[in-house]
Amino acid sequence: MAMNITYQIGALAGTPIQAESFSDSAAPIGPAAAWKTPIPSIRCKIIKPDTIEKRSQPTSPCRSPILSGSNGTRPDLSVVCRAFATETLEFVEMDESKAAEEEKMYKEVKAEKEKGVPVYVMMPLDSVTMGNTVNRKKAMNASLQALKCAGVEGLMVDVWWGLVERDAPGVYNWGGYTELLEMAKRHGLKVQAVMSFHQCGGNVGDSCTIPLPKWAVEEIDKDQDLAYTDQWGRRNYEYISLGCDTLPVLKGRTPVQCYSDFMRAFRDHFKHFLGDTIVEIQVGMGPAGELRYPSYPEQNGTWRFPGIGAFQCYDKYMLSSLKAAAEAAGKPEWGSTGPTDAGEYNNWPEDTQFFRKEGGGWTSPYGEFFLTWYSQMLLDHGERILSSAKATF
C-alpha cells in the first residue's frame, strides 16, 4: 500500500524552514515564502502486510525501564511487581473465557432468532370429504407445497369423529386422513391433529356440515335428553350433553369411552407419524371444540351478539346431577330447576334479575350454589377427557 503525504512538514514541526531560492540573498523574504516548502514526493508501504494487530498487554512496573535499574527490579518493588504480573495474567485468562462464553451465547440467540416463531396454518374444515378422500387433491398438494415454500412450519387438521366412525361404533375409516398426512410428510410439514368430537356447522366460520356419527344421532333421536337443552325445551345437537358422560347411553358405551376409543384407534393407526409428522394432539371438549356449553347458538337466529345467552342444564341428566348436588348441600329445593329469572338469549345483563350488577341473583346463596355446580360440571368433563387423552398419547 502506498500513501502520498502532502502536508507542510515545516509547519507541522512548528519551526519555520527557509525556502530554497535562486534569487539574491539580499532580497526580502515574506512570511509565506519563509514557511513554504517544496512538496516532497514521499511514498510509504507496509513492510509486513500479514501482521495482525493485537491488544497490547499492560506493562508491569517491574519491566519499566524507568523503574528498573541496571540490576533489574528495585528490591522495594519486587513483591508488588510479582503480584501485579500474576493479577494481570489472571485477568487476561478470565477476560478471554468470558468473551468465549458471550460469543457462544450470542450465536445461540442469533440461531434462535433466525429460526423465528413456528407458524401453523389451519386447514379447511372439509379437507377430508364425506367419502373419506382428500378434498381437491391436486389443489391441496399445490397448496401444501406453497405453504412450505412460504416458511410455514405445519398444519392444523380437524380429525372429525363424525367422518371416521360414521357408519358403526368401533369401525374407523382413516382413508382421507392417511392421504393427507402422507402428503404433509412428503412436503416436510408438521401436523397438529385436533380430535373433533363435535358437529361442524352452525358456528362462526363453519363452511360445511359434518354431523355426529350416524349411530350416535340415532341414539339421540331415541333419547332427546342426550342433547343439551335450555329452559324452553330447545335442543342443541352440536355435542352430546356432558350430563351423561359416565352413562352407557351410546350403544353400550359412555360418551367418554367413545372419545377414548377414538383417540386410541388414531394412535394405533398413525403411530409411525407420531413425534415426527404429528407433533401435537389437541382435543375438542364441547361445541366448536371448546370447553363450554352451547349457550349462544347462532342457528335459526336464536342468539345474536351481544346477548347473554341461556343456561343449558335442562336435559334430564343435568337436572339429575343438579338435584343430587342440592340434596348434598342440604337445600333440596334448589335442585328442581335452574335460575328462572336469568332472562332470554338476547337480553342484556341489566335486563335480568339474576345477572344485574347490583343485588343480582348471582350474588345470593342460591346463585353461588348454582354457578359453582354449573361450572364444576364443565371442569369435570374436561378432566375426564384430558385424563383419557394423556393416558392414550
Image (tube, rainbow, N blue to C red):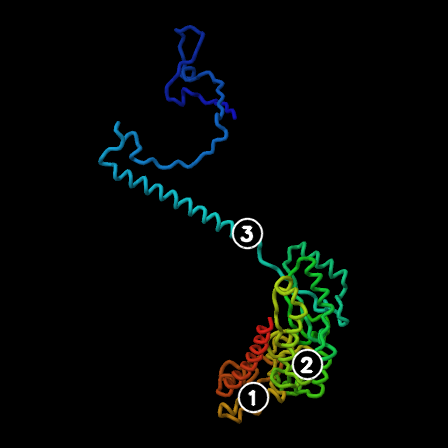
Q: Earlier in the sequence, mark 3 or mark 1?
A: 3
Secondary structure at numbered mark 1: helix
Q: Residue furthest bottom?
A: 333
Q: Which residue matches tag 1?
A: 322
Q: Which mark is residue 111?
A: 3
User: Where residue 246 appears, x then y in whole percent?
Assistant: 60, 84
Q: How many marks?
A: 3
- Circle 3: element type: helix
**Along the line of sight, which residue is nearer the eye, 28 or 274?**
274
Q: Which residue is mark 2?
A: 237
Q: Please tell me in which quadrant of the rendered image residue 208 appears.
A: bottom right
* Residue 131 position in % (x across, y down): 77, 71
Whether residue 306 is situated above or below residue 63 in the rendered picture? below
Q: Which of 78/305 is in front? A: 78
Query: Which quadrant of the rendered structure holds the C terminus?
Result: bottom right
* Distance of label 2 from label 3 (alpha carbons): 49 Å
| Earlier residue among tags 2 and 1 | 2
Circles 2 and 3: CB atoms closer than 8 Å: no
Mark in the foreground, 2 or 3: 3
How packed mark 3 is, by other alpha carbons closer than 10 Å (few <14, some 14-19, many 20 or more), is few
User: In the image, 301: left or right of 113?
Assistant: right
Badge 1 amino acid? Leu
Relative placement, left or right, of 113 versus 199 is: left
Relative placement, left or right, of 38 versus 284 is left
Residue most extreme to the left: 76
Numbered disc in front, either 3 or 1: 3
Label 2: how many Cα within 10 Å (few below 14, some 14–19, many 20+): many
Residue 197 locus on image (x, y percent): 66, 76
The amino acid pointed to by label 2 is: Tyr
The one nearer the camera, 292 or 382, is 382
- The three-letter amino acid code for the residue at tag 3 is Ala
Q: Residue drawn at (57%, 55%), measured in percent from left and top?
A: 116
